[in-house]
Amino acid sequence: MARGARHPCDRRDRGGGHRGAAPGRSSEAVRYAAIFLLLLLAFIRVDAKLLRLHLRHPSLVIAATAWTSVGIPILCGIAGLKLKLDLSDPQLFLSLMLQSVAPPMMAAPALAALLGLDATLVLITLVTSAALNPLTAPVLTYAFDRFWGEADTEGKNETLSPLAWSATTSGPGKARSANTVSRTS
């Protein structure tokens, strides 16, 4: 190949303008489409008889939802406090708490089906945990950050306001509101 010549696979702009979507947008659309398709496949594969059984006798669904919405965040918060993350790295502690209070991932029912587990129970738990998330996430994050965490004597501990906690753990504005940090005094 001659010097200065471009390889046919080189996708740089050749003077004719950029064709297609803006860079980065197509990969984001592919991610959302993949999540949507995994969730759609999980809904399609739901066993109607098993779904009715779980809805008639919801004790297992309630227990699984309580575990994913309350149990796991409490265990993660206690582990963070025992490791003194609230003192050594408060931002990491807050990040771990926000991650632990998030609802289960959308691909969980498809993964459960691949493993031969009860995908219907996982799907119902996913939906109920996501529905409860705006109520449980701000309360648990606030509780561990304010009440059970050690007091910040220098006033340098960064925390999210309760409204920002609610927005960062649920809803479409996750990325915008995750940057809303306020100083505590």
Image (cartoon, grey):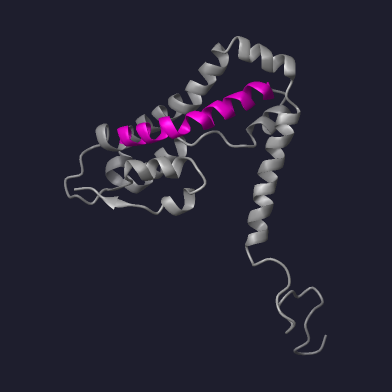
Residue occupying the point 52% across, 28% down: 129
Whether residue 124 can be seen here: yes
The magenta region covers 118-144
Is 162 part of what is drawn in magenta? Answer: no
- The kind of secondary structure the magenta stretch mainly shows is helix
Is 137 part of what is drawn in magenta? Answer: yes
Q: Quadrant of residue 71?
A: top left
Residue occupying the point 25% across, 32% down: 147
Residue 130 lies, with reference to residue 34, above or below; the image says: above
Which x, y percent locates residue 144? 32, 34
Residue occupying the point 26% across, 37% down: 146
User: Left or right: where does residue 41 sit relative to residue 25?
Assistant: right
In the image as oriented, which residue stretches furthest toward the bottom? 3
Which x, y percent locates residue 81? 32, 34
Residue occupying the point 33% across, 52% down: 181
User: Left or right: where does residue 80 sit relative to residue 40?
Assistant: left
Which x, y percent locates residue 132? 48, 29
- Numbered marks: total: 0
Q: Nearer the viewer, residue 17 or 34?
A: 17
Q: Quadrant of residue 134?
A: top left
